Image (spheres, rainbow, N blue to C red):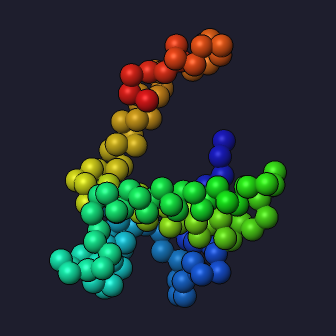
Amino acid sequence: MFPRPIPSPIGRECRGEGKIEIMDINDLTEKMHEFVRTKGWYEPDSQRPQTPRNLAISLSLEANEVLEHFQWQGELKDKDELACELADAALYLLQLASVSGIDLEQAVLKKLETNVSRVWDINTSNVESRKSPDV
């Protein structure tokens, strides 16, 4: 079906030293929190307050950086750089879910369950008829 995801970042700036670790979503979230704590960004006087609003903005900005890899071109030019941008977006997503009290793993599983029963592409001339209430 789909290839198994690569368990570690592959980009130049993203490449870590040492052995490859395989982590689940909770491990990744804790590793992300560890990093943010070491930078002092959870401190009340931080110049980078880690609020849901700020994290949502940062997530959007990183997602747009993913788009830059496809702007004006049909094919991906630099897989390593795309990997870095995807990792940045994923880290902000994990953090936003965590600080908002959302179990991202459960939210994704629930959404997949919802999508299984969703009707897709029945009437392509009427976009509104294809939307389910939770989209």
Q: Residue at x 65, y 81 (%)?
A: 12
Residue 97, above or below 128: below
Q: Residue at x 29, y 58 (%)?
A: 52
- Quarter of the picture containing the C terminus is top left
Residue 94 visible from this viewpoint: no
Q: Quadrant of residue 85?
A: bottom right
Q: Residue at x 40, y 43 (%)?
A: 108
Relative to the observer, which residue lies in front, 94 or 129?
129
Residue 14 visible from this viewpoint: yes
Relative image position of residue 24 (x, y in whole percent): 40, 61
Relative image position of residue 4 (x, y in whole percent): 61, 55
Relative to the observer, which residue lies in front, 38 or 58?
58
Q: Residue at x 36, y 49 (%)?
A: 105
Query: Is 109 left, or right, of 45 in this rendering?
Result: right
Q: Quadrant of residue 54?
A: bottom left
Q: How many marks?
A: 0
- Quarter of the picture containing the N terminus is top right
Task: Give the residue at the far bottom of this rendering.
Answer: 17
Task: Give the residue at the far left of this rendering.
Answer: 44
Residue 35, above or below 119: below
Relative image position of residue 66 (x, y in whole percent): 61, 59
Relative image position of residue 131 (x, y in whole percent): 49, 21
Relative to the observer, which residue lies in front, 111 or 49?
49
